[in-house]
Amino acid sequence: MYVIAEGKKGVCWGCIGILVISVVLIRPSEGLNAEGKSLLELKKNMNDPFNHLWNWNSSDPTPCYWRGVNCTFDRKNLVVSSLDLNSMNLSGTISPSIGDISSLSYLDLSFNAFSGNIPKEIGNCSKLEVLLLNNNQLQGSIPVELCNLSYMSELNICNNKISGSIPDEFGKLSSLVEFVAYTNNITGPLPPAIGNLKQLRIFRAGQNSLSGYLPPEIGACECLETLGIAQNYIEGPLPKELGMLKNLTEIVFWQNQFSGLIPKELANCSSLQTLALYQNALLGEIPSELGKLKFLRKLYLYRNGLNGTIPKEIGNLSFATEIDFSENHLTGEIPIELTQLKELELLYLFSNRLTGVIPNALSNLKRLKKLDLSINYFTGQIPSGFQYLPEMSQLMLFANSLSGVIPRCLGLYSPLWVVDFSDNNLSGTVPPHICCRSILMLLNLESNKLTGNIPAKLTGCTSLVQLRLNKNRFVGRFPSDLCKLANISAVELGQNMFTGKIPQEIGNCQKLQRLDLSGNYFSSELPRELGNLSKLVAFNVSANYLSGRIPAEILNCKALQRLDLSWNSFGNVIPDEVGSLLQLERLILSQNQFSGSMPAALGKLSHLTELQMGGNLLSGEIPSEIGALIGLQIALNLSDNKLSGRIPPELGNLILLEYLFLNNNQLSGEIPSTLENLSSLLGCNFSYNNLTGQLPSVPLFRSTGNSSFIGNKGLCGGPLGVCNGSPTFDSFPSADKSENSHRVKIVTVVAGVIGGVSLILIGVILYFMKQRTAEIVTSVSDKDVSASISDIYFPPREGFTFQDMVDATNNFHDSYVIGRGAVGTVYKAVLPSGQKIAIKKLASNREGNSVEDSFRAEILTLGNIRHRNIVELYGFCYHQGSNLLLYEYMEKGSLGDLLHGPSCNLEWPTRFRIALDAAEGLAYLHHDCKPKIIHRDIKSNNILLDHKFEAHVGDFGLAKVIDMPQSKSMSAVAGSYGYIAPEYAYTMKVTEKCDIYSYGVVLLELLTGRAPVQPLDQGGDLVSWVRSYVREHSLSSSILDSRLDLKDERTVNHMITVLKIAFLCTSMSPFDRPSTREVVIMLIESNRREGNFISSPDEDLQLQKDDHV
């Protein structure tokens, strides 16, 4: 057979001769043949902006010379056998006329922008062997007619918007070798007929919405080499029939809902090289039989519910390069057999319950590059052999109970770039060679017992970005050479024993963003050179022996958000220029010797949430401009000064304020009635002033008691009794002001921490209730459930009993399951009253204590808060080894399911409403809860929608209450893949800015309709994809979800504005991200400016303080 292909060199002269004869025999009057006309019909439906198909000419007798067209001889006639139009920037739809080219065996339209449905007429191309439609914008379902193509060996439809299910007739494709359909919206179960595909080698359908069980018939695909179905909703057990696939090299099942045990039959997949089962709900022990997979290179089982010990047989995986068992409930010690894995490059065992010492023999793994054993219960010393690992780059051992010294030669033989040993009991000094290779980026040794000076060689580590040495026992002076490091962005030396001056050279750290020198013995004045730090965001020198005035130059640090100079001996006046620090959120100047009047310019600090100026020598009146600080929330503390005059009525504008302390001053006049607006107030103190008149009707005043008003001569009303002209406080004993001042300071401190104490008490109560409950439940059998004492400890709604839950779910039968996760299962229950609730049943305590931590996390958060955009926790109970959490039922399910499901019909106003609701719920957690709460797992699947599509933030199993003691597991790795903030990878610390980043990803999902994880060739995550797309195509409507009405200019403009907010939220630096309260304000303002996409902005869109409890 002769072939004529465009672009071929060295053409066979015999072929040309035959072609010439063929062309001569064609009479010009006959014109273009039928196949050529079909191709022109195909072109008619296309947009070809770069004119790639310029030579498709209707006057040609044959299309065989056209670009992209290849022909072959079929008997005596030339026919089109191949059409290759890939990567030509073509758009439009695929014409049904393609089905008229019956001789076509190869069709490649990939990497274009075709939309519309896949034409069913392709099924007429009976000789088709290869069909490549990937990387377009095709929609609709897979035509069942394609299943008639018995010669089809390769079908690639990935990276489209194809929906519907895989046809049951799929099994008729008897010649199929490769099926690639990842990154679509395909739904439904995999058809059992897949077992008929005896030639199938590659099956990839990840990042869809597949559901149901994995059919056991898959075990009949005897040639299968790659099986990839990651990022779907496939549930149930892993079929043991997988073990029949002897040729299988890759099993990629991560981020599904598989449950049950890992089948030991997987050990029969003798060719397996990659086993990725992470982010599922798998339970039980790791099968020891996996050690028989002698060719296995990558074993990923993290983020499941696995328990038991690590099988020693894993040490038989001699080819293994990466093993990740992190974020499970594994116990016991690291088996010594793991030290035999000579090819191992990555070993992650963090966030388990492993114990014992870290085997020194791990240092025999000379290829090891990344080792993370953090958040466990390891004891003993850091193995001395670690210092000799020649390829080690990331060594993370934080949050254990390690003791002893850090190996002295650590860094001398290893290319270290991340070292985190924080939260241990290490002693001794910092190894002098830890940055020997000058590539170390992060060194975190905080919260240990380290001593000595900072090594001179470390201060010359030019690559260093973060140096965190807080909470140790370091001594000496601030190393001035540290200021020569051009890349340093964070220096945290707080709570040590450093002495001397802060050197002038500090001004050379041009990239410095965080500087914490608090709790040391630094003295003298602050250097003026601090004003050179234009990127400084947080500066804390509290609790030192510093003096002098605030250098005017520091007011050049316009990026400052947190400035803490408290508990020093600073004096003189506070300069008016402090009002130029417009980004300030926290200004803490308390317990110094500042004098003069308060600058009126403080009223310009519109971002301020906390202003602490107590314990100084300030005089004059409180400037009325303070009332302009409407964002002030945490505290306004002006106590223990010499302030006089009236309390400005403008303070009534501070409607978010929670603590107001004006005690121990010389204020006079009445407490203004405008303070009745302060509905958020949690604590206040007006004692020891010269105040008079009747107390205003502030709700807090009725419950505060006399202590907040003592030492005034003429106050009355409220808790002070009826105003009758008599001094109200005559009955109180007089006291020396200094003595009372001391007492008031104590009251202030107690008021500030009372929220944290109450939460700790809840934890203690839960502990004792759990002990008692365990005794009750153990004595009650299944048949006695109805007769047992109620196990519900959070007061449920009226008419709501435990037996109702049992009956409504048929004793928690699988048919009532509406969701599964790594730590439990969610059931829908309809109570006798008709009320619907959701019951989250966490795994048995036999699965490890991290389930208990998740249970406690949800109670300590949801159990203590109320907000209209937070899922309400009705109650909780402990029954027969399981923890139950009872929630309000969300009729519409999760945002993730709706947005990425097959029939998404969320229009932009609804999406925007959801975005704003979620932001308000998150803002409540970050700003209105005391202590603040960090969710740690914000994602579209954790934003739940009620019947009105109102959004509620849910799933607080990873939540962390800040400023409270936590178990180590509560510091566990947080977040879901695609949503985790970039700084978390090297800090392993969670802040509210991590929640902001995750929320920004949700915004991008709402705007683009894309999933948070993208193919690796597109950046691997949605944030990278969006930024890359905007760089290449500019900021336009083409990036927005095409399912929306993008013809309305108002809609597009608003979406672009929200996209800019999403960019801010997903900034690489956490310091560039806004707070959630700022996000709410920006969203409300965008709605107002771009045309009110949701109603009643003045009533609906503001933070609803009345909804908070």
Image (tube, rainbow, N blue to C red):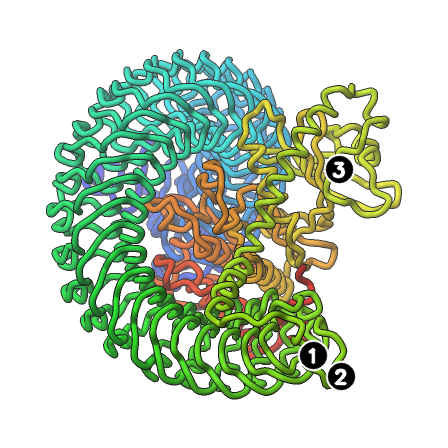
Which residue is the site of mark 2? 724
The amino acid type of the residue labelled 3 equals Ile
Q: Where is residue 603 in the image (x, y as percent from the top left)?
A: 45, 82
Image disc number at residue 29: none
Q: For the residues marked 1 and 2, what is the alpha-carbon distance in whole angstroms?
A: 8 Å
Looking at the image, is mark 2 or mark 3 earlier in the sequence? 2
Instruction: From this view, report whether residue 670 is shown above or below residue 396.
Output: below
Find the distance from the CA under tag 2 to the CA under tag 3.
Answer: 50 Å
Please provide percent x and percent y for residue 929: 57, 58
- Judged left or right of residue 954, residue 221 is left
Q: Is residue 164 left or right of residue 359?
A: right
Quarter of the picture containing the C terminus is bottom right
Tally the numbered discs.
Answer: 3
User: Disc 2 marks which amino acid?
Assistant: Asn
| The quarter of the displayed image where residue 380 is located | top left
From where the camera sits, is residue 374 visible? yes
Q: Is mark 1 on a helix, strand or loop?
A: strand
Q: Is mark 3 on a helix, strand or loop?
A: loop
Q: Mark 3 = which residue? A: 792
What residue sits right under mark 1 in the picture? 716
**The N terminus appears in which quarter of the rendering?**
top left
Please give the name of the residue rendered at 76% of the width and 45% of the height, measured from the top-left corner.
795
Q: Where is residue 251 drawn, in percent x and y? A: 45, 26
Q: Nearer the viewer, mark 2 or mark 3?
A: 2
* Kind of residue indicated by mark 1: Cys
Specify which label sits upstream in the sequence, 1 or 2: 1
- Find out whether the residues at labels 1 and 2 contact each other: C-beta distance under 8 Å: yes
Question: Which one is nearer the viewer's eye here, 204 or 1030?
Answer: 1030
Do the CB atoms of the residues marked 2 and 3 lie less than 8 Å apart?
Answer: no
Q: What residue is at 27 percent from the left and 50 percent from the top?
A: 496
Q: Residue 248: which quarter of the image?
A: top left
